[in-house]
């Protein structure tokens, strides 16, 4: 992996060889038209959602493209890249609290989980010089860490709350036997973490056989040598798997501590249809 930084820089430099024109993007939009037509014919009720999703995605990516061009322009200070990462973490944590309102402290726990995952992942990638520390590597790699961890982090938070709520009698029985809160919650915590990790584990198993991942496809389309693209993708896949594992573990452990009082009693947890949540 010692030659990967130079290779990565060369690959990133080759990205300019592929630049779709606006008319080609409009042609690609016709595929959305196919989806809309299917929704209409089959009466799926998704026509409006498909159109909104397509327009919103295009607008968001256009704005991000403009912002990235300013941040990644040669000579720009690296701290702008770190600022971008900080905003990314805050937005992801806010998304956690919005998608899982029943999880107490979802914003704070999510921010802590993403920060811990980024510290470990980026520490390895840049500390061992697997990738050069530049804004053009820092931002996309951080986005992969946070973006791929988001769904698993939300899922593990919801599963921990659901497990402890639905099996409260078992938890309290274990506490009555003299177990600590950590010991009483351990089997339910383990189930929640396993549930959250299974999709990423299965995706990692199938990579290269069932599907070609996005980073590899992007590099090949940009003109990179397939062997070089594979090596970059392997590093990225390991990054994502480790990141998802870290965020789910931090989220699950932190949440478990919030759901028990200092004297090892399980707090009240809202029913699925109860809009209130524990604080």
Image: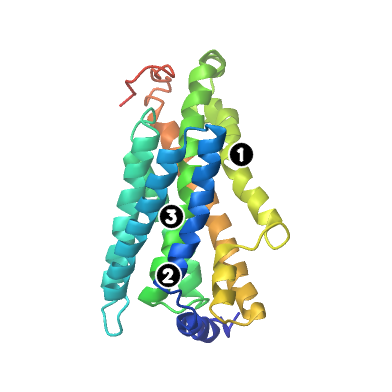
Is 110 placed left or right of 188 in the picture? left
List x then y, in percent, for residue 269.
Answer: 40, 19
Q: Determine the secondary structure under disc 3.
A: helix
Q: How crowded is mark 1: few (under 14 residues within 10 Å), some or many (20 or more)?
A: some
Q: Residue at image x 42%, y 54%?
A: 116
Cα–Cα gap, marks 1 and 2:
45 Å
Would residue 114 be seen by someone viewing this image from the given angle?
Answer: yes
Name the element at disc 1.
Answer: helix
Residue highlighted by disc 1: 194
**Distance between mark 2 and mark 3 Cα atoms:** 32 Å
Image position, residue 112 (x, y; %): 37, 48
Quarter of the rendering occupied by the N terminus: bottom right
The answer to whether residue 94 is above or below residue 278 is below
The answer to whether the residues at label 1 and label 2 have Cβ atoms under 8 Å apart is no
Dot in front, 1 or 3: 3
Q: How many marks?
A: 3
Q: Position of residue 99 (x, y in %)?
A: 39, 36
Q: Which mark is residue 23?
A: 2
């Amino acid at each position: 992996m010692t030659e990967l930084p130079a290779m990565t820089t060369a690959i990133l430099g080759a990205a300019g060889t592929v630049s779709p024109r606006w008319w080609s993007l409009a042609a690609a939009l016709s595929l959305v038209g196919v989806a809309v037509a299917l929704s209409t014919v089959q009466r799926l009720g998704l026509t409006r959602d498909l159109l909104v999703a397509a327009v919103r995605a295009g607008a968001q990516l256009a704005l991000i493209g403009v912002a990235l061009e300013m941040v990644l322009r040669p000579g720009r200070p690296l701290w702008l890249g770190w600022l971008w990462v900080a905003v990314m973490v805050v937005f992801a944590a806010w998304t956690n609290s919005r998608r899982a309102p029943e999880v107490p402290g979802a914003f704070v726990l999510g921010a802590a989980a993403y920060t811990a995952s980024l510290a470990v992942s980026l520490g390895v990638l840049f500390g061992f010089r697997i990738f050069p520390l530049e804004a053009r590597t820092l931002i996309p790699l951080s986005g992969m860490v946070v973006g791929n961890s988001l769904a698993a982090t939300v899922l593990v938070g919801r599963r921990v709350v659901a497990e402890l709520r639905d099996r409260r009698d078992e938890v309290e029985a274990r506490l009555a036997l003299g177990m600590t809160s950590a010991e009483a919650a351990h089997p339910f915590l383990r189930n929640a973490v396993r549930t959250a990790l299974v999709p990423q584990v299965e995706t990692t198993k199938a990579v290269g056989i069932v599907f070609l991942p996005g980073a590899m496809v992007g590099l090949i389309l940009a003109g990179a040598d397939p062997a070089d693209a594979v090596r970059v993708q392997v590093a990225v896949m390991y990054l994502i798997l480790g990141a998802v594992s870290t965020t789910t573990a931090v989220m699950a452990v932190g949440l478990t501590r919030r759901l028990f009082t200092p004297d090892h009693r399980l707090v009240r947890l809202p029913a699925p249809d109860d809009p209130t949540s524990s604080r």
